[in-house]
Amino acid sequence: MSTLAPVPTPPVRPHAASGAGAHVAYLSGRPMVRAWPYPIDDLGLDPHQLRRFWVAAVGPGPVEDLMRLISAAHRRKPLRLPRWLDVLLEERVAHVVGRVVWVPSGLPPLPRGTLTRLSPAIRRRYLEWLRSQLCPR
């Protein structure tokens, strides 16, 4: 009869898997990219309200990544490859050329194709809001 020796394990800090170190370890696996802005006409739309409609259309993760890309483009700072880049490419608000991600200089209005993903009630609210922003009384 043989006895098994315990397998040595490295010391672990409490909550190490959920702390900032775990996030950094996850990020370290993604390559660095540069973001460059392309100019858009923001039409004078309220960016906070517009952001709410973007979140309703594609979810909070892609919107956060888009905002990080826009910020990095303005600051000319590299950043890790966004996790939700595929959604941004599908929505045509980001374009990749080599290791450069081209993004709008600000949050654009929702593309026509994206509107079809909204529920009828939210789509109606968006179109009413957009009309009120573009054609104030």
Image: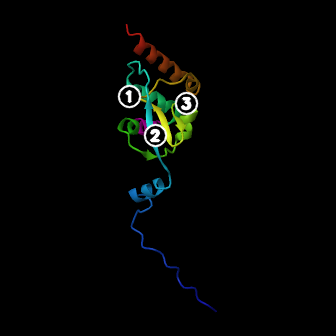
Q: Residue at the bottom extreme? A: 1
* Element carrying mark 1: helix
Residue at image location 58% in from the left, 33% down from the top: 90
User: What residue sits right under mark 1 in the picture?
Assistant: 48
Q: Earlier in the sequence, mark 3 or mark 1?
A: 1
Q: In the image, which is nearer the foreground, mark 3 or mark 1?
A: 3
Q: Residues within 10 Å of mark 3 (few under 14, many from 20)?
A: few
Q: In the image, which is nearer the foreground, mark 3 or mark 2?
A: 3
Residue 28, x across and y down, in percent: 46, 55
**Disc 1 residue type?**
His
Q: Residue at the front extreme? A: 98
Residue at image location 39% in from the left, 67% down from the top: 13
Say if 80 sits above or below 70 in the image. Answer: below
Cβ–Cβ below 8 Å for labels 2 and 1?
no
Say if 122 sits above or below 14 in the image. Answer: above
- Front residue of 131/71: it is 71
Q: Residues within 10 Å of mark 2 (few under 14, many from 20)?
A: some
User: What residue sits right under mark 2 in the picture?
Assistant: 65
Say if 76 sits above or below 130 in the image. Answer: below
- CA separation in Å, label 3 and label 2: 14 Å
User: What residue sits right under mark 3 in the picture?
Assistant: 92
Name the quadrant containing residue 40: top left
Apparent side of residue 116 relative to residue 32 in the rendered image (left or right): right
Residue 120, x across and y down, in percent: 56, 22
* Element carrying mark 2: helix
Residue 47, x across and y down, in percent: 38, 26
Residue at image location 47% in from the left, 23% down from the top: 109
**Disc 3 residue type?**
Arg
Q: Was residue 68 drawn as part of the magenta stretch in this picture?
A: yes
- CA separation in Å, label 2 and label 1: 16 Å
